[in-house]
Image: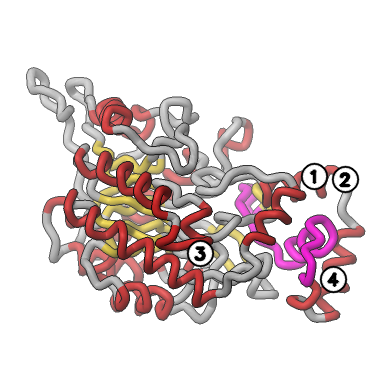
Amino acid sequence: MRQGWRWFGPKAPVTLDEVRHVGATDIVSSLHEEPIGAVWTPEAVETRRDMIETTPQGRVPLRWSVVESIPIPDAVKRKGGAARSEIEAWIASLEAVGRAGIPVVCYNFMPVVDWCRTELDFVTDTGATAMRFDFDTFAAFELFILERPGAERDYTPEEQARAKATFAAMSEEAKADLVRNITSALPGSTTEPMTIPGFREKLQEYRDIDAPRLRRHLIEFLEAVTPAAEAVGVKLTLHPDDPPRPLFGLPRIASTAEDYAALFDAVPSPANGMCFCTGSLGARADNDLPAIARRFASRIHFAHLRNTRREADPRTFHESAHLDGDTDMVAVLRELSAEDTKRTGDGTIVFRSDHGHRMLDDLHKTVTPGYPAIGRMRGLAELRGILHALGHPPEAPKPVPAGEPTPA
């Protein structure tokens, strides 16, 4: 397995040299500056690839192995195959990525909102901070700030009472923070920041779309783009819903093993794969992650390895340390590494330590929410240790010898 690191581009607080410090060999990145729906030109992709892969002599080379992600325009989620121009633009970007030699593209199909948290700096029992999704706070937002029509039907009287009490106890600053956390695009999101009126308008556009229809639109999208992926040697990996359940009355269709099975049955191409995110899938108690990894092993081309801890109300969870949550990370890595040993070359699984606690010096710095350097470094070290203990150490970085050309 290959050690990946999420890098947000030239302006990211973590530099490429600092990625080398932590032992990662593979970069997971995107052209984050491009608007959603814009066509990525071959020149833009190759320029970014060369920035990542040009290596000073004596340094460890990095490879841009995963694009996370090429955002899917909202029109595709609402219209499916009828959004022809948007799908054609997406294919053009995919082809630019494949021709630049990048073998994996990660994407998601969550409508209106991408990954969602109510808190970005929840203080854990160690004093480090983590991201958290609190069900009562989320309900307070939906019922009393967003005021989504019909939202009360999704909550019991007791849940509505708790949400009302939660809202009443919030300061104006806390309310503003909550609005920002939910409506502003979090790092790596494939949605754009929204105002409350804009949020309501977006939800209204989905009023006739239920789970079967959204799944049909995803299948139509895959039927259109998978042949292009096959042609340029790219594996498509669908990220699970986060959290893995309906939000704001919107359907979610990548939350369980059966959700993925339906997509793989409909589009059986090996290029149609999954991003195995242990944090997203693990937020549901009924998801057996080692069993899912075993069932879909050949479809897993990219893995987000992080952990969550469900709280007293299991719909509430926070990001735990990588080995301390509800997911048995040793069992998961046993399945993934067993599959990886069957593969060679570009087929090997890239994993990254996803998210991480904000700790030590990062508590006093401006950091990207969910992506502090030190917390992710701790996670990567722990995951690397598991792989060594299992007898499947990840590929070790090797420097470019003096006098030899750089990979790019």
Whether residue 35 is situated above or below residue 120 in the rendered picture: above
- Residue for point 32% across, 75% down: 266
Q: Which numbered marker is on residue 176?
A: 1
Alpha-carbon distance for marks 1 and 2? 6 Å
Q: CA distance from mark 1 to mark 3?
A: 25 Å
**Mark number, residue 162:** 4
**Image spot of residue 43 (x, y percent):** 28, 27
How many numbered circles are shown?
A: 4
Q: Please identify the quadrant where the C terminus is shown.
A: top left
Instruction: Indicate the amino acid at tag 1.
Output: Ala
Q: Nearer the viewer, mark 4 or mark 3?
A: 3
- Mark before the other along the chain sequence, 1 or 3: 1
**Label 3 residue SS:** loop
- The CA span between labels 1 and 4 is 20 Å
Measuring from the top left, give residue 112's x and y in whole percent.
59, 56
Q: Which residue is mark 2?
A: 172
On the image, numbered disc 3 is attached to which residue?
A: 241
Query: Where are the magenta residues, as a range?
Result: 124-151
Badge 4 vs badge 3, beta-carbon distance below 8 Å? no
